[in-house]
Image: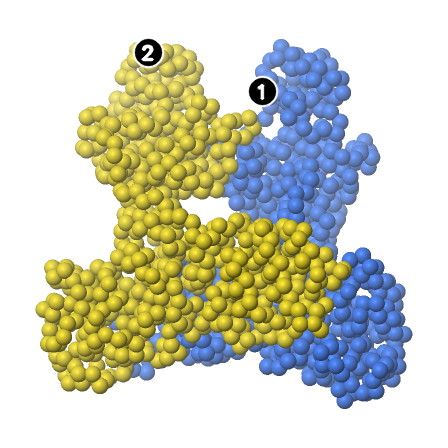
Chain colours: A yellow, B blue
Amino acid sequence: MDFFFNPKAVAVVGATPNPFKGGCSILKNLMAGYQGGIYPINPRYDKIEGLPAFPSVSAVDGPVDLAIIFVPAKATPGAVEDCIRKGVSGIIIESGGFAETGTEGRMQQQRVLDMARGAGIRLWGPNCMGLVDAVHGRVFSFMDPSALQAGLVPGNVSLVVQSGMLSAGFLVDIMTHGIMGISKVCSVGNKMDVDECDLVPWLLRDPDTAVIGLYLETITDGRRFINLCRGSVKPIVVLKGGKSARGAQAAMSHTASLAGNRRIVSGALAQAGVIEACDFKQMMDLCRSLSTVPAKASDLKGGVAILTFSGGAGIVSSDFLEDMGLTVADFADDTKKNLQAVFPDWMPVANPVDLWPAMEKNAATDVDIYSEAMKAVLADPAVDAVLLHVFVGNFRIRINLPDLAQQSRAAGKPVFIWLLGRREEAYQFQMAAREHGVPVFQELYRAVDCLRTVMNQKKHPSAVIAAGETGEPSPLSPVLKNVLDSAAGPLDEFISKKILNAYGVPTVEEVMADNVDECLQATARIGYPVVMKGLQAGDVHKTELGLVYLDIRNKSTATKTFRTITRKMGGRGRVLIQKHVRGHVELILGLLRDHQFGPCVMIGLGGILAEVFQDAVFAMAPLNHQEALVLTDRLQGQKLLDGFRGSPPVNRDELARILTALGNIGLAHPRIQEIDINPLIITAEGAVAVDATIIVR
Amino acid sequence: MDFFFNPKAVAVVGATPNPFKGGCSILKNLMAGYQGGIYPINPRYDKIEGLPAFPSVSAVDGPVDLAIIFVPAKATPGAVEDCIRKGVSGIIIESGGFAETGTEGRMQQQRVLDMARGAGIRLWGPNCMGLVDAVHGRVFSFMDPSALQAGLVPGNVSLVVQSGMLSAGFLVDIMTHGIMGISKVCSVGNKMDVDECDLVPWLLRDPDTAVIGLYLETITDGRRFINLCRGSVKPIVVLKGGKSARGAQAAMSHTASLAGNRRIVSGALAQAGVIEACDFKQMMDLCRSLSTVPAKASDLKGGVAILTFSGGAGIVSSDFLEDMGLTVADFADDTKKNLQAVFPDWMPVANPVDLWPAMEKNAATDVDIYSEAMKAVLADPAVDAVLLHVFVGNFRIRINLPDLAQQSRAAGKPVFIWLLGRREEAYQFQMAAREHGVPVFQELYRAVDCLRTVMNQKKHPSAVIAAGETGEPSPLSPVLKNVLDSAAGPLDEFISKKILNAYGVPTVEEVMADNVDECLQATARIGYPVVMKGLQAGDVHKTELGLVYLDIRNKSTATKTFRTITRKMGGRGRVLIQKHVRGHVELILGLLRDHQFGPCVMIGLGGILAEVFQDAVFAMAPLNHQEALVLTDRLQGQKLLDGFRGSPPVNRDELARILTALGNIGLAHPRIQEIDINPLIITAEGAVAVDATIIVR
């Protein structure tokens, strides 16, 4: 991948002197900052923009490791062939007209891909804006050179953007607004070869990149991507486009209907410690905030000091901090005493600190109130960060930004600034703050949102678990194995639970009965009350068909019920007798094989609560025990598991073991599409799967 | 109130030529735009800023209806006395040093207020920035004249801000960023006399005001304020500061503990059709959005057309629309056909519309793609609004803003713009868009949030119900009336339910028994199973004390239980026998007397769900039937009321009647502080209050 970022020489296929064409822009952008060899390729010219032009890449007499192609789609196979002849290492195809335009384009794209793969060449694009490296001043892109005339602002945030227009648009917006510095912007377009799973590892190793932000519409290999993120020590922020439901999908299990696209993506990202963004600018704000506070160095809890010029803004800041799980730090007595020195006597100092009375009191002196206040609160052990409000455009307010930044760095406690004021002064202040590594926000809510994210960022990489690495031999009997290998569609609950049980999932005591005698033997063994169900092959609607009878308390009812069920089934099916389990909590657990993330496990509230609150969370299998425990914490109604009204708390370790087992079943048996345990009933003795369905393809 | 906004002549008490003093700024600001008489008051000068100065207001020889006072707090009583002598109508005290500084200041404030009230003079402030009227160029404020040197941008949004620094800060920020035009900014400070309940009615009548935005830390008279908002046809946006819990308050009822400050405020605002903002800038964005689309004219449903320069931004816009309950409009065939004309053949046109391929196809023509696309989608009956994405800084994209604005107005369908691009061009575009009445946003999420708010705004004023106007004579017997008049603390459940029942709340069938004979007579009449409870005066912890026995099924258990309970109570208390009610839903209903909003009713999920989800909503009493119905809709778990697994849906009309009755009880009996109906059980026959406590002060 290195030849894309640090090529020794670049050929521009489709270079032209026509300033209205992308091929001209690519050349101009290269010449503006790239230090290696630049070879315009166009048989119609001898020179372009003062550089000698060549009829083909293979005609170049020096070595070329990267080619940027900007010719119509139909001309790309020829250009790629030419590159293969030359022996380039990588090609960026920036032109469109490929898979995004329909069947013909898709075939063209595949053709080009096959050619490159055959020659061992990596392909970037097509239909993309290429690559910008602001640290080294390299623009490998057809974006309008005039859009970048103000220059690139180097920084340590790298972006991967699956949308050409957005990558260019945001780059121009960010650069001209001076909001943050950038390391790389990688516009990956149709991702026919190079994708996020190639770029993330490269950026994780890149010393110029501290934070990675990705806008993705598809995740090519969800499992690999999540594992890459799991192992990252650099913060990764992802905005996933296309999360809304794409029409109703036919779903056979509760697990599938509770999933949606969104819950699985969000679950997998959360599991890997990825920060999920919900809007473009918020993503940029999160990235630049994270880039100022190294995760490793931060041992921050949630205490925040608020320094403001307005009591009202202090009040609203307190509201936001509490909303987001941070705390308005309780100042130590020393802190209060130190602050009080610059305040009028009538004003008892507390957090939030309204600096205005102190500024008025000291108007005639040269005491720097902001600096003094920072010093006092940063020294307080209860303060882990400072939220500073700044108004620019009033000359009575003095802010010594370098001093504040230095104090913050020295204390190892971030300072985030909410900025209000006159446009031009605000712009200048924001630019200066960026240079000093202090994040500035125009929206108070966003400032607190970003501060929260920085303070809660993961401190260590998560364990990376390779898929399928359960290490255990299959616990299934040959009969059950054979069922999984040969069946298709939903397995009945008896077989489903046998399989689950073999993997360690506790299941209800139950017996199949073929006649009344067997039925009564079963009830005698299990003990009343029992539940009786009629099972028919391939049918998952036994309740709706009236084939489920609860709370059967004696022989005569059992006998009558057996006959009723067999009559209703008309001889096609068998009767299942099981212990009637009463518990205090009902859960749904499940597994779903997702096309992007593979087997994902789910836990949700069961019974009527599943319908009312749709409270369910997902994670990608395999889960280790700790991840499974964290998953149960993510349930909105997780308090239900804590025990109430005399019921004991749910054994979360047992739940975690069941979730891990579910994931392992999914990994071991690729034919399993869905598993539904509904309900898993929690009793005083533990969890019991009372009904379950495994759906096999 | 008119003399504050349109005074004939203004005296400035504390006027001074010293440019570092507020008294000088007030004078300069007045002279810059106010057309009436201006009288500097300062005994030390003959002339200030070229105007003749007077030693006192009463020494002015012309009429003066408004005085602005900016002298130290201790000098204000003298200044007010002087104003009273002159016979002014209103005084704005802008100086601080009053209630915000502690006890002494609070006394000073009260003294000044008493003087003014005695003389029939209205007081505005103190500790405030006064009043700015951008439409008439009037600045009655000590804010720095240089901060407004770029001029005021007139508009139709008026703001009421309970924070001096914020009002000035936002005014400067808004004006210099060109984000929106302003009608009035009213900085009300300590609100000793003039408050939101004076200003809202004035602004509702003000022809220059279309939208009112308020930042409030306290709501002086919540009931009056809510009723004012209810009757408004102009959109009102409120940001309430100080919503976070201020330490744990001792709460005797579930209703009180579920309330928090936030839920009551939010409930009352929602009930009155007020739009609640959560951040300062979001509040401004909501106000300016609402100011462009008149509520009355709008008969908009949720269909939105997305016109974008980026497929990716289109995808994310779709996500946002779905999140917020709007819909990505399904285009009619005609629309698609009209759009297709400007698009390349390979691209089938659908919503979101990515305009880029059309721009590329028509690059050599003078077809205005944005204009053509707008025409096509505005003509579509499924489209109620357009979300337009604009990138500035690429000269291949042409936007004819006046044309787009005109098309939107003609169609009566709002167009909201998300803007990305180069800083200076973006600023120019935003200014132009403001002048054409098209809202522009830099954050896509905010654009959709504001569009949703505009499309969902209330079309008609809500019914205004004067407090206490139930019109009914009290249905309470003299005995019950006497209990309410004389008791203090919690009433036992028997009495509580008697009172509730008198007001039409259905309660469980129950009898008090003093001995075993009475007990058995009661069980015989009620029918088994019964519940038996030991009631002790003033005690609300009968469950925790083990005085509640459920599911008693026969005489012998009843007898034994009666004896157990009486023994446990040691003779102090009585035994209550009631029907054991089984139902399918448990709710909590309640009443809470709030210090700002008076009696407020609550409905929430009961049982364990109350603890797990804390799902409860509030509204201010009295509620009419419709409001009570809407309240039940606001429950997060309201689907629970729809019936499930064979249970019939809850009778929402009956719930609404009970909620209305609860409110009426609170209005009729001011000594009632709290009412808890916990649980209200829903059975097939209807709702039954099974346990209830009324707390009297």
Q: Disc 1 sits on a residue from what chain? A: B
Which image quadrant for residue A570? top left
Residue sticking out furthest to the right: B85
Amino acid type, mark 1: Asp
Task: Please tell me whether residue B656 is drawn above or below residue B223 in the rendered image.
Answer: above
| Labels 2 and 1 touching (C-beta < 8 A) | no
Residue placed most toward the observer, A455 or B406: A455
Which image quadrant for residue A558? top left
Which quarter shows the N terminus of chain B? bottom right
Residue under label 2, please give it. A521
Task: Please tell me whether residue B401 is drawn above or below residue A531 in the rendered image.
Answer: below
Residue placed most toward the observer, A140 or B82: A140
Per the rendering, the mark at residue A442 is none
Q: Where is residue B429 in the image (x, y as percent from the top left)?
A: 46, 77
Q: Position of residue A101 (x, y in %)?
A: 23, 65
Q: Is mark 1 on a helix, strand or loop?
A: strand
Q: Position of residue A335 (x, y in %)?
A: 65, 55
Q: Where is residue A205 in the image (x, y as percent from the top left)?
A: 31, 58
Residue under label 1, please give it. B551
| Disc 2 residue crowd, few under 14, some 14–19, many 20+, Cα 10 Å | few
